[in-house]
Structure formats: structure tokens, C-alpha cells
Amino acid sequence: GAVVSQHPSWVICKSGTSVKIECRSLDFQATTMFWYRQFPKQSLMLMATSNEGSKATYEQGVEKDKFLINHASLTLSTLTVTSAHPEDSSFYICSASGTQGVGRTDTQYFGPGTRLTVL
Amino acid sequence: DQQVKQNSPSLSVQEGRISILNCDYTNSMFDYFLWYKKYPAEGPTFLISISSIKDKNEDGRFTVFLNKSAKHLSLHIVPSQPGDSAVYFCAASGGTNSGGSNYKLTFGKGTLLTVNP
């Protein structure tokens, strides 16, 4: 139980294009989803927290206009990297915490991650 | 200021022996602690958690100990298996927000565990 999927698992794009990453909770309702990025040999860095039906809360230093987050339903959140540049290349991971089903409210369940490479 | 610290970047253990991974925290508001296991190029997998009202939680081969006065927790894996080789992250969350479902996690930098056959 508590399965979170991400799509795509990897993407390569040209500089200046936008990339959308989807995060889905498959067997529970996730009122809160989190987006992280991880640089090589570093810890997970929280980018933003999104609650279903409301605007995301961004961490300090994260550009909200560059990293657009939408949490339209209890099972889906999307992260769009707009006008991507090579420095945006990273491993992006989402997580979800739930209110019903197998997802506990106090535990985050992570997706498998998306490797973004911007040329 | 790093609120969750994993001071050992790596640990090597022989198969069948005990693995002990340590984590220290500085924020006294943290009241829920989790351990995640992560393989390269994959998302973290939840292993075990502990609330601050407990000092021990056990799940199969995994046991987490919490020492609140020392602001220290540890993960014990017994017996260690080669498949346990991965990066282990300690994470903490603190307090409750309205609605009770907005738990931001603060992660340590991880410890790479290698279990040798």
C-alpha cells in the first residue's frame, strides 16, 4: 500500500522548453504532496508543499514562477519546470501524505523520481 | 543550520551482523521521526518511524530507538543483509498544523550502508 508514481521517469529537453512532471498517489488520497530535488551526493531539498485545491507553498529560494505546481485532485500533483536551463538538471522527487486509506497523515510516501537533463 | 544530522557518511558491516545508523537533531519541536532507505536513481522508501512519546519501535529486522534528552535516534538492522546496502536517510517533522496533514520533513544528508557478504 501507499504507492506513489511519477511520470516520466526521465526526460531530456532543450534549454528554454518547459517540462511537466506528474505525481500520483495510486492507492490513497493525498491531501498534501511535496516536491523535492536532489543533487548528486546531497540530501533531499524540499522545494514546495502543495495542498489539494490551494496554492503551493514554496521554500525560500525556490522561484514559484519557474517551478509551477498544481495539485488539482487528491491523487495528482504536477510540477512544471518552465523555460528550463542546464542548471535545472536534477533528480526531482515527489511525495504524498494521506488522510484516508493506507497513507498515514504523518508519513510521506515517495515516488520513484524523475531525472531531468536540460541540454 | 542543519537541524537533522547524520554524521557518518558511510558505514560498512559484515552480513549477519548488526548495522547501527545514527541521527542527531537540534530542533526540540520535532516530534516524529522517520527512516527512509534509498537506492540510486530511485525515490526513498519508508522503513520505520517513531513518535516522540515512544523510545523504541520495532518492525521485523528494523528497530528505531529515540533518546529525547540527547536528541538522538538510531536505526538498528539485525541481521544485516547485502540487500540492505543503500543510503539511509533520517527525517524529522515537528508539531502539528491545522488539518493535521501538513508534515514537512527535514532530512539528514544520509548514510551509505554497505553490507558485505
Image (spheres, helix red, strand yellow):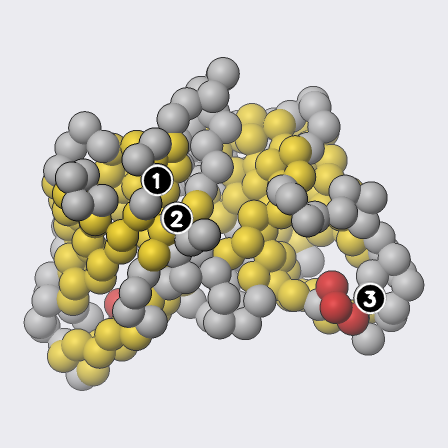
Dot 1 crowding, Cα within 10 Å, few <14, some 14–19, many 20+: some
**Which percent across, then down, holds residue A37?**
60, 57
Is label 3 in a helix, a strand or a loop? loop
Q: Chain of mark 2?
A: B
* Front one among B69 and B115: B69
Residue that badge 2 annotates: B3
Q: Quadrant of residue A117?
A: bottom right
Q: Residue at x 70, y 23 (%)?
A: A54
Q: Tell which tag, 2 or 3, sits nearer the viewer.
A: 2
- Badge 1 and badge 2 in a common chain: yes
Name the quarter where the C terminus of chain A is drawn: bottom right
| Location of residue A113 in the rendering, given as x and y in whole percent from the top left corner | 57, 58
Question: Mark 3 or mark 1: which is in front?
Answer: 1
> Which amino acid type is marked by label 3?
His
- The residue where tag 3 is placed is A85
Q: Name the amino acid, label 1.
A: Asn
Q: Dot 3: few (<14), some (14–19), or many (≥20) neighbours within 10 Å?
A: some
Which element type, helix, strand or loop, lies under badge 2?
loop
Q: CB under 8 Å between callouts 3 and 1?
A: no
| Furthest residue in direction top, as rendered | B98
Q: Which mark is residue B27?
A: 1
Q: Residue at x 42, y 53 (%)?
A: B2
Contact flag, marks 1 and 2 (Cβ < 8 Å):
yes
Residue A15: x %, y % from top left: 87, 68
Measure the C-alpha gap from mark 2 to mark 3.
31 Å
